[in-house]
Image (spheres, helix red, strand yellow):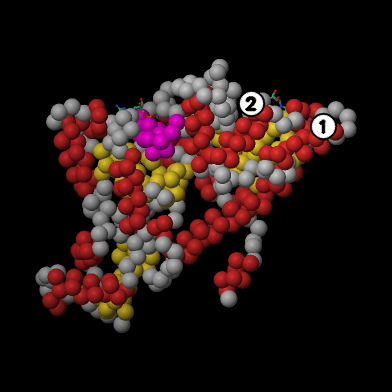
Amino acid sequence: NAKTVKSLYKKPVDFTEVDINMLPTVLIIGRPNVGKSALFNRLIRRREALVYNTPDDHVTRDIREGIAKLGDLRFKVLDSAGLETEATSGSILSRTTGMTAKVLARTQFAIFMIDVRSGLHPLDMEVGKWFRKHAPRVKPVIAMNKCESLQGGTGSLAETVVEVYKLGFGEPIAMSAETGLGMTELYEALRPSLEDYMAQVLNDSSTQDKCSSEDNGSCEVDESKLPLQLAIVGRPNVGKSTLLNTLLQEDRVLVGPEAGLTRDSVRVQFQFSGRTIYLVDTAGWLQRSDREKGPASLSIMQSRKNLMRAHVVALVLDAEEIANARRSMTHAEVVIARRAVEEGRGLVVIVNKMDLLKGKQNEKVMEAVPQEIQTVIPQVTDIPVVFISALEGRGRIAVMHQVTDTYEKWCSRLSTARLNRWLLKVMSRHSWKDQAAQPKIKYFTQVKARPPTFVAFVSGKTHLSDTDLRFLTRSLKEDFDLGGIPIRIMQRTVT
Ligand code: GDP
Ligand code: GDP
């Protein structure tokens, strides 16, 4: 049948066209000094890396992330160090190791490097054991590095190959991170599995597109289970980075004024109760130059284009500023909130730094923010507002609960039968001023989800006024629990 034919036909994946959000992650592992960073630098070329920890004397290196380019392959690459297995609890060493374990959890692929000059080292065995324990699903490509430096014959190489099989990860490739030797082999070793992975991910997202443009409610895929694209937006210093740390539950993004951190357009992905969340263009507001523009500026993240890529927009406000100001939202914040709603995104407002409020301020802020949001965005009722303290690490569950709840509502699909039963009731509930002028809706249907969009087929001479549309929107929201998300109703005339 058609489905089997489709799955047999495999179109080559064009990695250069893939949103970097979606690219697979390849982690480079290995004991110190095997050449992990040399390979990392070669893969990302001159592009900048995202550095998670500043280098420290006691630690060889920190976790860096970048977008790798290898032929036509693109992937996220992580340079990991600190795989040392010594138990130096509390030290930076063990912290790095712990962090790597978390990073491992969302790594799909790995390159396990060894130094061919020293053959298989006992520490390589340790790293192998460690890796197998923490990432049992990932089968790394073994890369024997520094091959260009082998003098004369291939004796040592052949011996190492035999030894490397002891690691139990299969056939190694020979390479040199410094000279670029063996990059084709690395490409060939990675390409098939990366392509399979990518094809699967793209297939998922094309199903998603197909469903959202479908004209009837029958869609096999539960769209609300697809990856959620979340944008965290707000003015500089409201606590976005701090919140991000809380959400990720690990030290992957540094907060505060530490010097010398470089970050580029790498996006972050994490899991929340079994769901994959992609953070859309987080780097935009992490850039220092952007922060230095001062509190008035909204970062590039908030461009219309970026908002369009998000499913849910989390707008972060500063509670302390609200407590001391006449209004809860600055002009820029209002603009961004309105824009998110106009673009049909789900909006969640996060009021951060609640720990700084004293006495009555608490109540004042908790009352003022929802009120003001209702005033500035009257078209969407019940936009969720979450009060948190990112610094104290409080609010992760509350934020993620609202974000996923909003997303699920945003993905809602109501069957035509259900909608028309509802319509009968709701039309009789409404007290029409002029019975004669009462619009006749023949048929009501949802044409699209993400966000939910409806069409009312109105008969001949009648017409739905703005008031009628508002009434229908409000009723839909109340009766189907769709508060807090933008809903669209269009009308078509039928004869
Ligand atoms: P890491 O600790 O695993 O990240 O290792 P580095 O990338 O810092 O490399 C450790 C040392 O090995 C450095 O002095 C590099 O210049 C050197 N190195 C890395 N790759 C190669 C290679 O392919 N050939 C040779 N000869 N040296 C290399
Ligand atoms: P960003 O520019 O929006 O990413 O803001 P940051 O996350 O860098 O935070 C700016 C400053 O606010 C930092 O000094 C944080 O420590 C501080 N901060 C962030 N969240 C909170 C919070 O919940 N309470 C308090 N008291 N300070 C916070």
Write the residue at 22% across / 64% down.
Answer: 479
Foreground mark, 1 or 2, reads 1
Write the residue at 51% across / 36% down.
Answer: 101
Total tally of numbered discs in the picture: 2
Write the residue at 43% across / 33% down.
Answer: 250
Query: Please, is residue 187 above or below residue 422 in the view?
Result: above
- The single residue placed furthest to the bottom in the displayed view is 495
Query: Is any part of residue 41 visible from this angle?
Result: no
Q: Secondary structure at mark 1?
A: helix
Q: Quadrant of the C terminus?
A: bottom left
Region rendered in magenta = 235-251
- In-image side of 185 versus 337 (left or right): right
Question: Circle 2 is placed at which residue position?
Answer: 32
Residue 49 sits in quarter: top right
Please state the horizontal and vertical placement of residue 200, each as a whole percent of the image. Answer: 56, 57
Please state the horizontal and vertical placement of residue 483, each as a whole percent of the image. Answer: 25, 56
> Does mark 2's beta carbon lie closer than 8 Å to ligand 1?
yes
User: Is 53 contained in the magenta span?
Assistant: no
Question: Circle 1 is placed at which residue position?
Answer: 156
Please state the horizontal and vertical placement of residue 246, each as a whole percent of the image. Answer: 37, 35
Write the residue at 64% across / 42% down.
Answer: 140
Q: Secondary structure at mark 2?
A: loop
Please state the horizontal and vertical placement of residue 301, each as a whole percent of the image. Answer: 43, 41
Residue 161 sits in quarter: top right
